[in-house]
Each structure stands twice: as C-alpha cells, then as structure tokens.
Amino acid sequence: MVTLQLRQLTVPPGQRIILTDVNWSNFEEILEELSEKRAKRVAYYQNQLEIIIPLPEHEFDKEIIGDMVKILLEELEVEQECYGSTTFKRRDMVAGIEPDNCFYIENYRLMIGKRRLDLTVDPPPDLAIEVDVTSKPENYDLFSKP
C-alpha cells in the first residue's frame, strides 16, 4: 500500500480530486490538516471525499450572490445570521459539506453567537448557496455577440 500526504497533491484551480474509501476518522483528519484557512473546498458522503479548488470566477460569483441575498433580506427587513462556507458534518449520516454561503433566516435567533455547530441538535441553514462554475473555452465572453 502506498501512503501519500495531502501536501503532495497538487490540484489546479477549477479541478477536483475524488478519494474513495475514506473513513470518518480520516475525513476529520483531512479537515484538520487542510485547516480553516484553505482555498480548497471539501464534500464528503458515505466514504467518498471530494476536494475542489474553485476558479477565481467562482469566488467572484459567490460573493456577488451572497451580497445580493444580504441586500434583499435587509430591504425586506428580514433578520438573518450568515454562516458563510461553514463545514457542516453529521457523523451519523456519514456526510459533510461546505456550501459557498449559507444563511439562517427562520432559525436565526437560535444561531446568534453560536461558534460551534452540532447538526444533531442545531438546525441546518435555511438557505444554502452553491455556485457551480465549470471550465469555459478560453475565448468565451458572456457579452460577445454570437
């Protein structure tokens, strides 16, 4: 059996790597090794781990959409708690995911000031945003005429 360390893996922006047969303990160790200050995004479901490196346009789009949601909720005078791209994990479901941005709206009062979440007790976010930006041809321009 060959053992590799995460620092040996290079994943270019816009690409992903999928690891199979990753147990829950390994998933948590990988999250720890990647740390909270990472550019990588992770998703884990039933022993399969996906590590994604977002493209710059993904980050731009997620910020614009998050800002639009905040402005809309403010204009509608709807209270909210934004939890950004928090890692949500449930060991009993063997699943973990990081939305691009998420909001507690109906349940915002329950979440004010919470710094650690336990999804067996705490509710999931009321709104989760996931931006999907895939590779485009180099000369693709949204504003060019066909």
Image (cartoon, grey):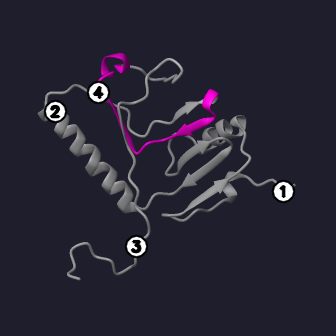
Q: Position of residue 14 (x, y in %)?
A: 48, 64
Query: Pointer 3: what residue?
Result: 136
Give whichever of 114, 36 is nearer the camera: 114
The answer for how far apart the CA atoms under marks 4 and 2 are is 11 Å
Q: Position of residue 18 (x, y in %)?
A: 64, 55
Which residue is depicted at the point 50% across and 36% down? 87
Which mark sits nearer the N-terminus, 1 or 4? Answer: 1
Query: Which quadrant does the C terminus fall into?
Result: bottom left
Which kind of residue does numbered mark 4 sit on?
Ile
Comparing labels 2 and 1, the label whose residue is closer to the camera: 2
Query: Residue 105: which numbered mark, if any?
Result: 4
* SS class, disc 1: loop
Which mark sits nearer the N-terminus, 4 or 3? Answer: 4
Which kind of residue does numbered mark 1 sit on?
Val
Query: Pointer 2: what residue?
Result: 74
The answer for how far apart the CA atoms under marks 1 and 4 are is 47 Å
Q: Position of residue 84 (x, y in %)?
A: 38, 38
Span colored in magenta: 92-112
Query: Residue 2: which numbered mark, if any?
Result: 1
Which kind of residue does numbered mark 3 sit on?
Lys
Which residue is depicted at the point 43% across and 42% down? 99
Give whichever of 112, 108 is nearer the camera: 108
Q: Position of residue 141 (x, y in %)?
A: 28, 76
* SS class, disc 2: helix
Where is residue 142, by image quadrant? bottom left
Is residue 25 rendered to the left or right of residue 91?
A: right
The answer for how far apart the CA atoms under marks 1 and 3 are is 35 Å
